[in-house]
Image (spheres, rainbow, N blue to C red):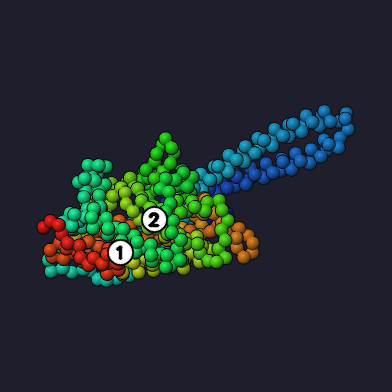
Amino acid sequence: MIDPQLLRNDPETIKRSQRARGNDESTVDLAISADESRRAALGEFESLRAEQNQFGKQVKAASKEEKPALIAKAQQIAADVKAAEARSREADAAFDVAASRIENIVIEGVPAGGEENFVTLREVGGVPEFDFEPRDHLELGEMLDAIDMQRGAKVSGARFYFLKGVGARLELALMSLALDRALAAGFVPLIPPTLVKPEIMQGTGFLGEHADEVYHLPSQDLFLTGTSEVALAGYHADEILDLSGGAMRYAGWSTCYRSEAGSHGKDTRGILRVHQFNKLEMFVYTDPADAEAEHLRLLGWQESMMQALGLSYRVIDVAAGDLGSSAARKYDIEAYVPTQGTYRELTSSSNCTTFQSRRLGTRYRSESGKTTPVATLNGTLATTRWIVAILETHQQADGSVRVPEALRPYLGGLEVFTPVSA
């Protein structure tokens, strides 16, 4: 939800954001009109209620003879107040609908345009080179008996899989390394629910234009989360936080579900884009004044993981039209995938400013004692998809894969994954 004060005082800033995203800026004018109607309806209700209160005093002070007529009038005023209250509630709801069509205000400097208009901030590690024809991650995974797509499809359908043997161990090692690094950075670990109520899913911005990507259980009216960001954002809904000790940081380890995976024939081989995966997600509540600095800290922790795993990557500043509705800025880290000859997204981090907290009622008390919406940020520190880049980057001519040194302590000192089939 955008700031109503900004809508009233500086609508041009919101319109510029809408244009940068490629969205219809007329939604801003509609929201302004709805806000005016809401405030007018509220003013009418409060005026009538004040009249009712004042008239009530007259009734109490009236003589026995005067009271019947006054009581009749009081009943009419009460009916007017009830009707005005109903109109005020309707106007409030109409404003919420109008305002919900406006996505978060992009931060100044975010590139305008769509998916292809990102800006590359840096490339790290160079392109991996081989003196043999590299295999893709699925072929390697099958040689290592680490990935079983065929039985995944037999059990659950297309885009499901089994991680087996060293594949399962690799994912657990990856997640454990990420968790240890998150703990060292002061994050509190959480294993959150993966089913959430509609108001939590809506509050985080995942039931907008991408609602068809979310699994819904109609009989329970619950949603399966595509990231633990959703549950972590809801963790402090309708609370006033104490940020006197600094930002509140959580690391959520959960299974994630996305129904859009593999749509439009995109990335349908292997485990790059699947319906179910595991992820360790960083989530932060902080003073809005520190949100941009915190965003860079999240990015720094992500890059440190990439470097520890020996992956070549680039950092991009995602264009406004490719941001989710809640994000005011997003940095993606894309690892180089040798068999695809290009960079593919492994992780992202988003600064959602106060957009989610306004919807979810999450505030903090400032030094002045005033309560105000908190800023929320999120960023992935490890996920199943990273196995793609790890296997392909560290493969050897015989199909074996060197284990990144940072992961070896979590694998009993194992240095190489050895094929079980040639």
Disc 2/disc 1 C-alpha distance (Å) = 17 Å
Coordinates of residue 3 in the picture (x, y in percent): 54, 55
Residue at x 41% of width, y 36% of height: 218
In the image, taking residue 253 as reference, residue 395 lies left or right, namely: left
Residue occupied by mark 2 = 253
Foreground of the two, 79 or 217: 217
Residue 354 visible to the viewer: yes
Residue occupied by mark 1 = 410
What amino acid is found at the position of numbered circle 1 in the picture? Tyr
Badge 2: residue crowd in 10 Å (few <14, some 14–19, many ≥20): many
Coordinates of residue 89 in the picture (x, y in percent): 60, 40
Q: Earlier in the sequence, mark 2 or mark 1?
A: 2
Q: Is residue 200 above or below residue 292?
A: above
Residue at x 45% of width, y 66% of height: 186
User: SS class of the residue under badge 1?
Assistant: helix
Coordinates of residue 219 in the picture (x, y in percent): 42, 35
Coordinates of residue 399 in the picture (x, y in percent): 15, 61
Q: How many numbered callouts?
A: 2
Q: Is residue 118 above or below residue 125?
A: above
User: SS class of the residue under badge 2?
Assistant: strand
In the image, taking residue 218 as reference, residue 136 lies left or right, namely: left
What amino acid is found at the position of numbered circle 2 in the picture? Trp
Residue at x 26% of width, y 47% of height: 160
Foreground of the two, 143 or 204: 143
